[in-house]
Image (tube, rainbow, N blue to C red):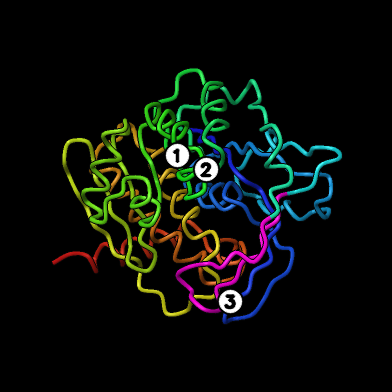
């Protein structure tokens, strides 16, 4: 079943111990869409400026990603981010961020996308996320992402959003900032009190934590990776793999979400193996399934 994603689309410059790449395709929606397309058709909604180099975002090839919701806005400039992982592969240092078109009005969801049943609101302003969600007729599952900026400056609007969604994905630092709880289990339960049915807390190289409304908690380690080239987009790819798998399931239960987390973990492990989308473009569903089975076997005891 089609999965709709809306979020940032950008031009990245990345520095890591493995090297540097200038002006490559990036943005939360791009990584998410590519990752999710290994599991289900994806509908991509986003906006970029007319300054984007020709062909930069023609990255999906034969992937089942409908880009008719991608708006190229005349007279605007594309979101740009320059980040460095040279000091710490677990945390990016933002050297320069130019919001550009992301500081303008958001994109519109095409009429033929409004029947989407699975929706992921990738990181963007919570007011914009609410506006986009309002365009969807009868969603079956809505999950959102957020970041420390919105937690700090748009907390009231973010809390409104949390009352309208089924799941929230955020990292450990964001969970602590949002709830003022140091313990992640307590932080997760506090997030659930705001409205979502489940929360997924990403912990980088230490994996992820799932806590559900009925009190279940599930901890999953990261896939043991020997070669980390570029962590950019790992969290978005994780969410894409998770939501892509969930969109193929008839019912979303704690058990299916657990399996979805494992798929997200495996997809992200391919993302970090190369710069930009290189790791995802070099893999396949068969390779992902093989890694998922190895991961499952490693978790059995």
Provide residue 227's location: percent of width, then percent of height.
47, 79
- 230 shown above or below 143: below
Return the mark for residue 214: none
Label 3 sits on a secondary structure element that is strand
Residue 20 belongs to magenta span: no
Is residue 84 highlighted in magenta? yes
Question: At x 44% / y 66%, what residue is drawn?
Answer: 269
**Label 3: few (<14), some (14–19) or many (≥20) C-alpha neighbours in 10 Å:** many
Give the image quarter of residue 288. bottom left
Check if mark 3's residue and mark 2's residue have beta carbons within 8 Å: no
Counting residues from the N terminus, which is met first, the one under dot 2 or under dot 1? 2
Q: Which mark is residue 16?
A: 3
Disc 2 is placed on an element classified as loop
The image position of residue 154, as x and y in percent, is: 50, 38
Image spot of residue 232 (x, y percent): 55, 63
Residue in view at x 26 percent, y 56 percent:
182
Task: Please tell me how crowded label 1 is: few (under 14), some (14-19), or many (20+) other residues with Cα within 10 Å.
Answer: many
Q: Earlier in the sequence, mark 1 or mark 3?
A: 3
* Number of the label disc, if any, that sits on residue 144: 1
**Do callouts 2 and 1 mark residues in contact (Cβ within 8 Å)?**
yes
Residue 97 vs residue 157: left or right?
right
Distance from disc 1 to disc 3, alpha carbons, whole Å, reads: 28 Å
Mark 1 near mark 3, Cβ–Cβ under 8 Å?
A: no
Please say if 117 is above or below 26.
above
Residue at (52% x, 79% y) in the render:
87
In this figure, which residue is indicated by the disc labeled 2? 122
Magenta range is 79-97
Q: Secondary structure at mark 1?
A: strand
Q: State the residue lying farthest toward the top.
A: 137
- Who is closer to the viewer here, 7 or 40? 7
Tell me the distance, in whole angstroms, between the alpha carbons under discs 2 and 1: 6 Å
């Amino acid at each position: 079943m089609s999965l709709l994603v809306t979020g940032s689309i950008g031009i990245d410059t990345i520095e890591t111990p493995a090297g540097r790449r200038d002006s490559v395709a990036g943005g939360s929606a791009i990584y998410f869409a590519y990752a999710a397309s290994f599991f289900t058709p994806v509908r991509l909604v986003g906006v970029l400026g007319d300054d984007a180099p020709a062909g930069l975002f023609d990255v999906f090839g034969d992937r089942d990603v409908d880009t008719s919701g991608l708006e190229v806005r005349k007279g605007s400039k594309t979101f740009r981010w320059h980040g460095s992982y040279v000091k710490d592969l677990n945390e990016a240092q933002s050297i320069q961020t130019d919001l550009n078109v992301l500081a303008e009005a958001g994109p519109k969801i095409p009429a033929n996308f409004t029947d989407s049943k699975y929706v992921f609101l990738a990181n963007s302003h919570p007011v914009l996320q609410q506006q986009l969600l309002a365009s969807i007729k009868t969603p079956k599952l809505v999950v959102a992402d957020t970041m420390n900026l919105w937690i700090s400056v748009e907390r009231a609007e973010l809390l409104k959003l949390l009352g309208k969604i089924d799941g929230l994905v955020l990292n450990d630092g964001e969970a602590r900032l949002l709830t003022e709880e140091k313990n992640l289990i307590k932080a997760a339960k506090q997030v659930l009190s705001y409205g979502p049915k489940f929360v997924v807390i990403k912990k980088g190289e230490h994996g992820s934590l799932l806590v559900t409304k009925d009190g279940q908690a599930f901890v999953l380690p990261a896939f043991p990776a020997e070669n980390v080239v570029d962590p950019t987009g790992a969290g978005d790819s994780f969410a894409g793999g998770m939501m892509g798998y969930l969109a193929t399931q008839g019912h979303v239960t704690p058990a299916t979400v657990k399996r979805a987390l494992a798929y997200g973990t495996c997809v992200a492990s391919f993302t970090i193996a190369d710069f930009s989308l290189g790791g995802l473009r070099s893999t396949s569903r068969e390779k992902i399934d093989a890694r998922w089975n190895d991961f499952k076997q490693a978790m059995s005891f």
